[in-house]
Amino acid sequence: MPAKPQHAFKPRKRPVQARSEATVSALFEASIQVLLTVGYRKFTTTRVAERAGVSVGSLYQYFPNRQALITAVIERYLGGLRATIENRCLELRGCTLDQQVTGLVDAVIAAKWENIEVSRALHEPLADIGGAELLNNMAVKASGSIAEVLRSCADASFRDVDRLALLIVISCSSLLQAAITDQTGVIGREALRAHMGAMVLGYLHEMRAAEPQAAAG
């Protein structure tokens, strides 16, 4: 069966009044609860509407199908992660490279682990909604904030900093997904923190721009 076009996963309308915003927020929260309770295979608009205390008709005013609803839920989740990264980036401007890497790694892992079950529950629907595009958009936006931090680094400078920042985000995202879906217990929070920090710091140390040599006497 051919894949649905991406516009089929878009909301019908955006909430503009306080009552509408409250309804959409209730639908988002209900969606998370349904995912945590029964999983994505049994995730239906009827279950979400019942959990939110609204009619299915009210849900369909905003979201034409379950894919559109779960897309909006994931977009909000990724937006929260991006906001966490951006806020931490502001705090780390002008710090040393070690401080910047440690601060960013700690912030990202803390944000994921604060709602680890939600992170896991949202992993399965990604394939159904073309999640690669959502993740790529998030990576590009987050990498812009990280590039600005690296430009402000107190004890290191980098060439092609935008490319470096994007590669860091992509690499860390892959590690985070591996940790979230790990069933062996090998990739725990502290192990992830140590290895991700070492990976990013080692990479950036390797890619530092050479210090200009002092002019001859």
Image: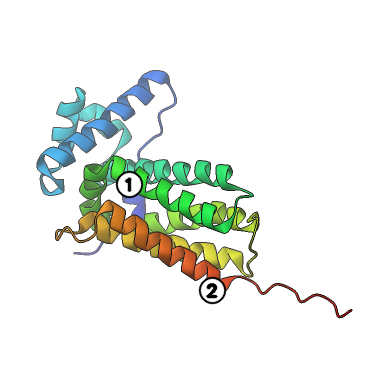
**Does 5 sit left or right of 151 as displayed?**
left
User: What amino acid is labelled 2 in the image?
Assistant: Glu
Indicate which disc residue 167 carries: none
Q: Which mark is residue 206?
A: 2
| Residue at 35% in and 63% down | 195
Viewer-nearest of discs 1 and 2: 2
Identity of the amino acid at label 1?
A: Lys
Placement of 67 over or under 14, stated as above or below:
below
Q: Is residue 44 visible?
A: no
Residue 217 position, x and y percent, is: 89, 79
- In the rendered image, the residue lying farthest to the bottom is 216
Q: Quadrant of the N terminus?
A: bottom left
Q: Nearer the viewer, residue 149 or 128?
A: 149
Q: Which residue is mark 1?
A: 112
The numbered mark, 1 or 2, whose residue comes first in the sequence reads 1
Q: Residue furthest top?
A: 19
Q: Secondary structure at mark 1?
A: helix
Q: Secondary structure at mark 2?
A: helix
- Between 150 and 118, the residue placed more toward the observer is 150
Among the 4 quarters of the image, the one containing residue 73: top left
Assess disc 2: are there few (<14), some (14-19) or many (≥20) residues with their C-alpha within 10 Å of its C-alpha: few
Residue 211, image x, y percentages: 70, 72
Q: Quadrant of residue 191?
A: bottom left
Badge 1: few (under 14), some or many (20 or more) residues near its Cα, within 10 Å? some
Q: CA distance from mark 1 to mark 2?
A: 28 Å
Q: Position of residue 71 (x, y in %)?
A: 31, 46
Judge whether residue 39 can be spotted in this image: yes
